[in-house]
Image (tube, rainbow, N blue to C red):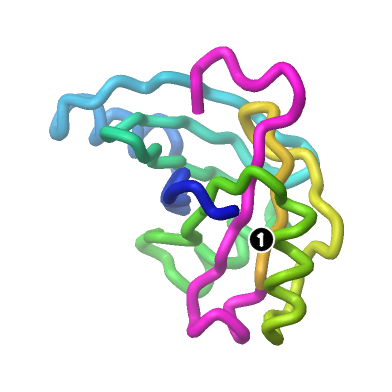
Amino acid sequence: MIKKVDHLGIAVKSLDEAAAYYEKALGLKCEHREEIPSQKVRTAFFRVGEVHIELLEPTDPESPIAKFLEKNPAGGIHHVAFASDDIDSQLKQAAGAGCRLIHEKPIEGAGNKLVAFLHPKSTYGVLTELCMPQAGGCACGH
């Protein structure tokens, strides 16, 4: 059911400043920017081989990314996302294995994907995202 590591989510204070680093210092190209009101973030995606780097800038001081940045002022890796071909079954499997679900049902995420998170207290300290393309997929291929 898990197909690959889909992306690494990195919390940043400034999307523009962080994107400039990835473009100028690392030579990567930003493939896609998007605001996700339900998650209270703006995102930028960079492809590195089969995996994307997702930069996340909070749009609301009460968002999970803003709270992460309060605890980690320099920013940093926020989550690891795994691509699944059946997110509902993957959630049931995780719950059956004792994982605490942040989302019991998938919600809409960036790139026209369904997403759900597993709580880091039950995943050895790593906030884990499960994601699956919705019908129609994302034009950027992520």
At x 66% / y 61%, what residue is drawn?
64
Which image quadrant for residue 93?
Answer: bottom right
Residue closest to the far right:
105
Q: Residue at x 47, y 53 (%)?
A: 11
Up the image or down, 86 lies above or below 43; here it is below
> Where does the image place residue 43, in percent across and percent down from the top left?
54, 35
Q: Is residue 42 left or right of residue 105?
A: left
Task: Verify whether residue 98 appears in magenta.
Answer: no
Q: Foreground residue, 58 or 119?
A: 119
Task: Say whether residue 27 is left or right of residue 63.
Answer: left
Residue 17 drawn at (x, y percent): 34, 35
Residue 94 quadrant: bottom right
Q: Identify the magenta region.
A: 119-142
The foreground one among 24 and 88 is 88
Q: Position of residue 88 (x, y in %)?
A: 79, 54
Please identify the dominant SS of the magenta region: loop
Q: Which residue is pictured at 60% across the width and 53% down the height?
A: 1
Asked whether 128 falls inside the magenta stretch, the response is: yes
Quadrant for residue 99, please give it. Answer: bottom right
- Three-letter amino acid code at disc 1? Pro
Residue 48 location (% of width, % of height): 28, 34
Q: Report the residue marked by disc 1.
A: 64
Q: Secondary structure at mark 1?
A: helix
- Residue 113 as seen in the image, left or right of residue 37: left
